[in-house]
Image (cartoon, coloured by chain):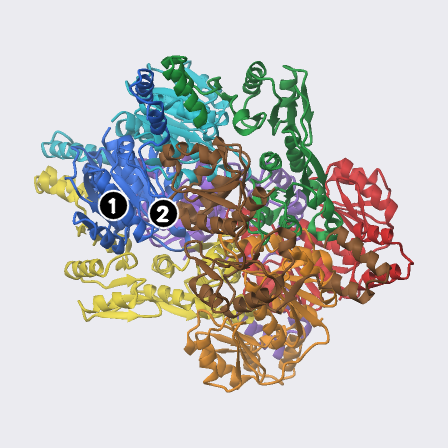
Chain colours: A orange, B red, C yellow, D purple, E blue, F brown, G cyan, H green
């Protein structure tokens, strides 16, 4: 609730177009739904431009069912469940036939309206084949948020000609998501080749001193190329949120 | 050197408008200057849209002098020296009268042309007073890169009304840089209030379990608010690069 | 055994109302029961105001059975087994029909007398739905210890209006337990809104740079809001102990 | 601003006893003072029951002077500057003769009214002599906040009879602050001796595997004694805030 | 091979009582048996006073079988396999009927001669019931190495009277093994009560900030009580080796 | 594509022996095959002297099948799949009868031509029996790359005579791979015995403070013996690459 | 106060040979002296067999002076101040002429009686020259505690013949203190050569991945040689305490 | 002392050409000199092919003087003191006029014979200007060990054309030392461009999440390019030892 809305509300109270109790109620109970175990936030789309999103881990199937049912009755937009194993998909599918499962991306979409698509595109790049699931989480999320998405996979720096042969698709993107595990050097190299903003996603791919993605994370944070924003390890979803915000400016 | 330039070069060779040796030389020695201890990269501005930048730590005053002198003769744009202590400023000032020292930001600018300025603005927000030096590094860098910059300082979450009273300036920005030490929670709260892209800078402010900024860094990486890109601890410069790229889209 | 008791014992010895050997025995074998693999501490309730508690992990079902049987014969109060999987419940249920399983809280209570309840209440707050099991461990423990408990779940800072709409229930509590994973920022924000003591519980909810709760732990320890006491990751039980001690003052 | 105040304000607007613009202003600019580099929060005392506090590190002497001057004109209570080196004291003393320096505690108090004092006392306990500066920060802070404070220093567990000889002063306290470095075992032992809430402060005393207080911090967080709330390493101030909130219940 | 043996060998060569080739062979192939995947070290008992020991993890059952068979033919002493799951026991039992399985200690002994026993005893102390498996590994190992062993289990510092009631058995030991997880404070408290050497074993018991035994390890290393030697996390075997060496002096 | 090849290509363009478009294509699409999920790099053998290698983890069986099929049609050399579980072998075996499974080494080789072998040998040394799987990965990889390989297993420093009895085989090697877990001291001791280059591989063998190989890794990096190059934990493959490059000089 | 003493005291109370108040006083105020900032523990020598020891860091010179003065009047034994810089020595020397400064060991001894000396000796071994200060702290401490001490310095494993040439002095010791930085491998190698108990002291010597002694610490904890007890980084004092307890058995 | 030498010695003893005592002495006291604080190892050059080297930190100027004097009288080769501050140089220069100070490399050489030089060269590459001191330590060390050395500085991946323009000098080297701080990505990129062995040196250049070189270290260890051997952070000396051993094969 921004200042303009607050001004309007106060004017209404002054003009007796709104009861004090009603105003109080509005101010107290901003638009979320209380399921006791979850406060479903119907307001977020307005505020953040996202679809309603359910982060699946740690929620019981019953809780997910309850949240989706509430969303289905209260809003008309698409719904995204991230980090969803197949049983989450089955649960949602049992409520609504609109559920689609993007398996590699571990994402369920309840598709109730066509995805919009931007003219500019987000490019999703990976260093290796093993980074693709995280990249797909980013790509599907960005698509659901209404972005055009292109993919460039397995172009890690150990065979740098694979990357150099693809400079045009990099430079024509509006924003680039770089997904890499191990030492994460791909973010630095792409960062040196382009003037586009880069969202870097370290992945947990690797072993030993990769420490579950810490090496890639640190490498991206300390990149000698400037202008790289880093998100959490394996966080394809968050990278897509950041990239989508940028792409839609 | 992008594909278009490569095509043109090859055409020139074919049409005998360019000697093979010349082409080879061009392909081998892309536009940087070799000072043996430094390869000054005059190409970067074209490629990345930045001024030429010198990262000062670990370079001797003589090396910095040599690099600036080379830049002064080879290009006409502004020059930025980051993380510059006063002796770096004195060294540069002794070569050119155009040097300006932004002390709190630890930045030297050799200002040879007026800063450009965008219509949209980058907002730089800090949690506390102690975070201001890092914020100023970001603000000065962004300014030198040609952006309009606004500041909102000392609005940490322990007194959240200070932040809530400033929602409009947050929502009217095109991109927001959030600078915070300790637990870095400000990034999450701002992230929940706006749909603008956020570049988060953890600072080394704090003691004990702050671990020199690690707590803030981890807090920003794991934020429950999506769409936050994180840069290195105290890296106001990098945040400004990212924000400037976004602001100029 | 405090100084008054010691004085009394010495007086008794002096007055030959207590044999030296008896006194020696008393001083040597303060009231615990030796099962060789466990020293059951019947004294703790007097000393600490707690029910007798069994921390289940690392104990065999036989050992748990032995400890409960000993407690059942030696005291009459309620018994709490924490971190109890269903087989622990089954084992205890096989000895006594008074066993109740609070599944989400992973807690077994042998309820031999009604729970007492305080006039003031402890408020248990969570950032997300996934934090609820830890919160329930705290809530059930606090209830068994004789406290009135209220719950406020899923009010994380990414949608801060959900929290601001619940300020009264926060301010009317006597002590507040804040349960949050990821970056744990909720503790800071609640800490800035109220003058009540806060016990913060970081949870292991999250992935990647959450490092199993370390991010939340560090964030709570370095909170810019003062007056927050932090317990171990996922330690709902310990938070309830602290809150109960405070609530009963 | 709580719900009652919000109701009253809305009523006033309705009854035309308060202009919309005035209400808006009030809602927008809750009582803090904007010095650009600092938003001085005069509201905090009401909200949290604290004096106004300045955390000194990272602030320039000019900034501290500005903040204190603002506080002196806008409120009448005591002012506390924590982590204050002598030059901070000198700066404040130059503005007001009421400044007192508690050197060991590194705390400056501008004492404009007598300290209140509670009937119940907070007990501050240290493991060693080297922990005393942190303990004094806690003791002075608690005193300024209006609490009766008692001290029990150098009673670490390596000579446990020193502690056992002082059980009564421990048991008669309302809340206990345990300050310990190295392995921090004192918190566990005190926790096993009493049913009073304990606020534990790990200190950076020690070397090698003490890792600047991490060992003590981890030891306190994983204590086998329940009901211990831990604050940041060396954070005597925060421990006093927590203890004061509890002591005043 | 010590200097005396070397002198003797050289004398023999000089006196032609030993061929050069033989001496060379002896010097080259000190007494171990080469199974290609293992060099069985029959010399260790002479050198270190231990039985032959097999560390089971990472060895295939076939390799363990081969090693035991070799030992059975080449020496006559007892054999100990540590960290042995039941299948290791079954494998060894299939070769020799002398195999005994100490299940809680995860130790297999091929008992071919009676255990010797010392007059002085090693005391094994644990903080909790969950630490017993590690303690039993220590106790069984010490027993096999020919020591008298006594046990004192579940005397952690949260109920310090349980420990203080057992001071005599502590003070009459020759060396004490303290086994504790969580914060490991028991080592410090026992260290303050006695002048006997203490071997401390941190265990991985605990959760969250216990970090698999790191908290206990750090706590023991930084103990305020001097004269404590620490071994690896859960290393009951190593503690017994150290204690046995001391007990037999 | 090196400078000579670039010169030749430019000459061809100049002499109209190569079309501009063709040259552009060549420069853009250096010799790799795009399977969308993988860019198969047929160029690597030329560039690095390796066989084509597939790192198996994180790739689906379908992806591995696709990659191998592509390799089989496009090149004639041997193919190595590292970190291959049995199902990977079965998948490859179903395509080509030339697949061999080295189980302990977790390596699949599609052997289409005889392994070459060098006159000089690489020596692979392990500290213990449990380190053998990593050593075998190194040995098999080195063999496939055309090196003579010798093995010296289970010669850890706790029985240093086992090592000293094998000095000649160490000193006659051209390069030595030392594989050790726990504290990794074997690298230091071998490093002090020989003037040959040493590639050290820390293994994850050990428990507790071994931290999955970190102790061995740090020990090897900080070795008091100079001239040791360290690879990632358990990285037998990488050690063989390094050793093979050296052996073939 | 052990059980025998307690029995005697109780008998005295019973026989009216000791007043209740006197007994109470004795039980309450075990023999330490309360200087408010320090509880000087005159009892420790009896209990632990040590001289009175002052750990200097974190204590003001005035506090050290006060503690020494108290010790001088209350006991007659030697006094040791560890980790003492020269100003600590000067302060103590100003009170008593018996103060001696062992500079390399950073130890002050107030020598009021001749050091006793054992027949068996403690051997102190170092890997390098840089480890000597820590070794000297151990050697001086052990000497003051009444032990015969021998030294063997700079015998690190990179030149293992230096160590092998000194096997006899190692094997004739009763207990061995091994002092080593970097990777700390010396402890493992000595542990493999002897059956004597080893106390290992990691030192902070080294750089980079030595991490201030962590590498050596981990290496010693995970040593493949069994029966090594480890103390804190640079803790020569603690090693001497442990070794002295063992040597005097 | 290898097996051949041992055989010869034994033959001599047998033939009475060598006394038993002499042989014993030889076997006991291999060629090092005992200065009590240092065992000077004259044997190392034979064994390892190095000059005699003094690691300066932690040694007093007197100790360094003593060691150099001993070396000057006992051998005739060059002497290298690494990590030498100017006072170390002054000390050595005061003994011998042959001392030369390579300031940037922090290395002192006592040059008593001309440096040898190989036909093949070692290439030392740095990512930035700030990495040069570590690179120079490597270059000077390699030169003193008799290698031809070439340098390629400031070719980090953020401006990858600077590196690609220098492929020939990379490919013509026999072994390459890559020196890089921050994320250390240069090692991966060079590793993908060449089939020569690479010794990677992480540097402590950077700030924040560089953690004093840990990011670069982890990045190099987990490089997606195979065949890279990593040395300790800032360890230019060790890299030169490894490279020299390889270059001289």
Residue at image position (49%, 75%) is A39
Check the picture and name the quadrant holding the N terminus of chain E: top left
Label 2 crowding class (10 Å Cα cut-off): few <14, some 14-19, many 20+? many
Q: Quadrant of residue H12?
A: top left
Query: Do labels 2 and 1 touch, CB within 8 Å?
Result: no
Residue at image position (26%, 67%) is C87
Residue sticking out furthest to the front: F114
Element marked by disc 1: helix
Subunit of mark 2?
E
Vertically, is A124 above or below F53? Answer: below
Vertically, is F66 above or below F137? Answer: below
Element marked by disc 2: loop
Q: Position of residue G3 (x, y in %)?
A: 17, 35
Q: Position of residue D77 (x, y in %)?
A: 56, 51
Q: Position of residue A51 (x, y in %)?
A: 59, 77
Vertically, is G33 above or below E124? Answer: above
Residue position marked by numbered label 1 in the rendering: E69
Vertically, is B84 above or below C192? Answer: above
Check the picture and name the quadrant holding the C terminus of chain E: top left
Are labels 2 and 1 on one chain? yes
Residue position marked by numbered label 2 in the rendering: E183
Residue at image position (32%, 64%) is C141
């Amino acid at each position: 609730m921004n200042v303009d809305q607050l001004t309007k509300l106060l004017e209404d109270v002054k003009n007796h177009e709104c009861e004090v109790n009603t105003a109080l109620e509005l101010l107290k109970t901003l638009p979320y739904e209380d399921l006791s175990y979850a406060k479903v936030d119907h307001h977020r789309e307005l505020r953040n431009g996202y679809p309603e999103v359910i982060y699946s881990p740690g929620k019981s199937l019953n809780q997910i069912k309850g949240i989706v049912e509430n969303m289905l009755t209260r809003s008309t937009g698409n719904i995204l469940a991230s980090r969803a194993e197949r049983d989450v998909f089955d649960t949602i599918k049992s409520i609504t036939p609109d559920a689609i499962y993007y398996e590699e991306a571990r994402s369920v979409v309840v598709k109730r309206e066509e995805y919009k698509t931007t003219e500019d595109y987000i490019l999703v790049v990976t260093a290796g084949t093993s980074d693709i699931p995280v990249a797909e989480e980013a790509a599907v999320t960005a698509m659901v948020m209404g972005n055009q998405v292109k993919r460039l996979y397995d172009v890690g720096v150990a065979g740098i000609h694979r990357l150099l042969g693809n400079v045009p698709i990099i430079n024509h993107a509006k924003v680039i998501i770089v997904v890499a595990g191990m030492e994460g050097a791909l973010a630095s190299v792409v960062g040196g080749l382009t003037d586009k903003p880069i969202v870097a996603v370290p992945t947990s791919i690797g072993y030993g001193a990769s420490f579950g993605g810490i090496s890639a994370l640190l490498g991206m944070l300390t990149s000698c190329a400037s202008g790289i924003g880093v998100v959490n390890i394996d966080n394809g979803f968050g990278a897509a949120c950041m990239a989508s915000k940028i792409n839609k400016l």
